[in-house]
Image: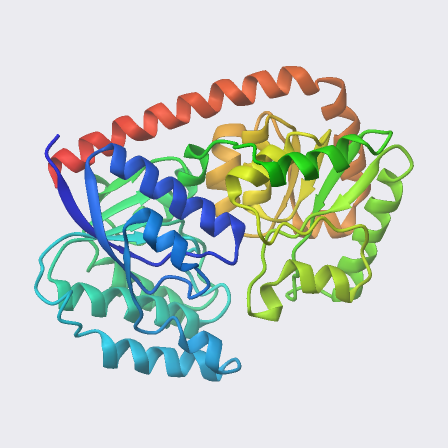
Amino acid sequence: MSERKMILLGGTYSNKGGESIIRGTLKVLRNLNVSFEYIVDPDPSFPNEFYDKENLTPIFRWSKSFLKYPEPLNKFIALLDCLRKSNDPRLKNTKVPIWYIGDSSLNDYHSVLSLMGQIVNLLTLKKVVGGKLIINASLGYTRTKLGEFLLKAFLKNCDLFLVRGSNSSAILKRLGVNPSKIYIICDFAYHIEKIETEKSVKYSKIIRDQGKPVVGLIFKPIYRVKNKDYISVIEKVSSNLSKEYQIFFIPTSYSHLHSENDLIFLERHGFKPILNLTNFTPEEIISIFSNFEFTVTTRLHGAVFSILAGIPTIHIYEADNSLDVIGDPFGDLLPLIHLHEFLRNPDRAIEEEKRLVQVRDEIASEMTRRVERIRKNSIDTLKAVLEEL
């Protein structure tokens, strides 16, 4: 396959799930002879060492606005910055394809303003570059008629969709996208693998030295439900598990936005003990997770890290992208519990734990086989898509 140049758009560093997506994306596409020079609007938290190692030049249009202003002003300023700074001479009329690293779903789940920001971000870059727009993201339901109208109009301007599961594919078709433009591949985070380092070995030893089996609890801040109810069920589940296991709370998002920062959420509500993984790569985190008996996680990529570590996970989800990333390949193997069901019946997580522990080794073997399968199927699909571009 001949070399193909592309421009990357997006990429998250402060959320370990988002970081795993970009690392997996670069690994796979470069192995398929795709080269990148620029990454547009990455998370400003990426260290310079990342750009040096990956040989990437960041171009910031709007992303630094989020560090300067409080919400919701930051969204408005970011929108203006995106319009004002898009005509960068390094991008203008290069005609190369744009690869959107969709580490957040395309929908109005948070707000119509957020969806509008995503659309402006994508379309302004396409207009300047003049290349095809490749969307690699999950699609969720739209809450509002305005959100659905905007999303439908936007999708007409996209050239190719590489979605992460059947749910997103069905949503695209319902919104009028031609099925010939839609391909299903696995989440790129599934392409990374665990790496042991001096740091990760130290944390692994802490876990193994507890004297009893250890469970990882990954709970993110959720503000669309009654906070006291959510806190109450976390306390109930952690208290019940503590009778048989040593538990550790594991933050996997360290966002500058407090509403998305797991560490701030856990510390604010007094959940202990906490394993702070701020300075660990996703590959190191997978290595650390391999020491747990199982995990309970409201973070999607907390479940992905667990699967890659070869340990069972109970995934409590609220957004449809979990059905794509976890449900499609592992839904008959691992329990997915919707957030509202978890709030009504937290005991189900305890019941599922007892079942998982009994067949832990069998689940681990089957997860490994399935990861290999979805990796291969995705790479075969990507090869065919890249040949057609």
Can residue 174 be seen at all in this image of the molecule?
no
Q: Position of residue 232 (x, y in %)?
A: 83, 57
Q: Quadrant of residue 268?
A: bottom right
Q: Position of residue 285 (x, y in %)?
A: 58, 40
The total number of labels drawn is: 0
In the image, residue 308 above or below residue 111: above
Q: Residue furthest front?
A: 198
Q: Nearer the viewer, residue 95 or 30?
A: 30
Q: Residue furthest right?
A: 243
In the picture, measured across the screen, residue 19 lies left or right of residue 365, that is left
Residue at 17% from the left image edge and 37% from the top image edge: 386
In the picture, measured across the screen, residue 220 lies left or right of residue 101, that is right
Q: Quadrant of the C terminus?
A: top left
Residue at 55% from the left image edge and 23% from the top image edge: 367
Q: Quadrant of residue 164?
A: top left
Residue at 76% from the left image edge and 35% from the top image edge: 207
Q: Position of residue 65 (x, y in %)?
A: 41, 77
In the picture, measured across the screen, residue 222 lies left or right of residue 380, that is right
In the image, residue 169 above or below residue 48: above
Q: Quadrant of the N terminus?
A: top left
Q: Nearer the viewer, residue 264 or 235?
A: 264
Q: Nearer the viewer, residue 216 or 381?
A: 216
Q: Position of residue 160 (x, y in %)?
A: 22, 47
Way the structure is coloured: rainbow
Q: Quadrant of residue 51?
A: bottom left
Can residue 359 be seen at all in this image of the molecule?
yes
In the image, residue 47 above or below residue 364: below
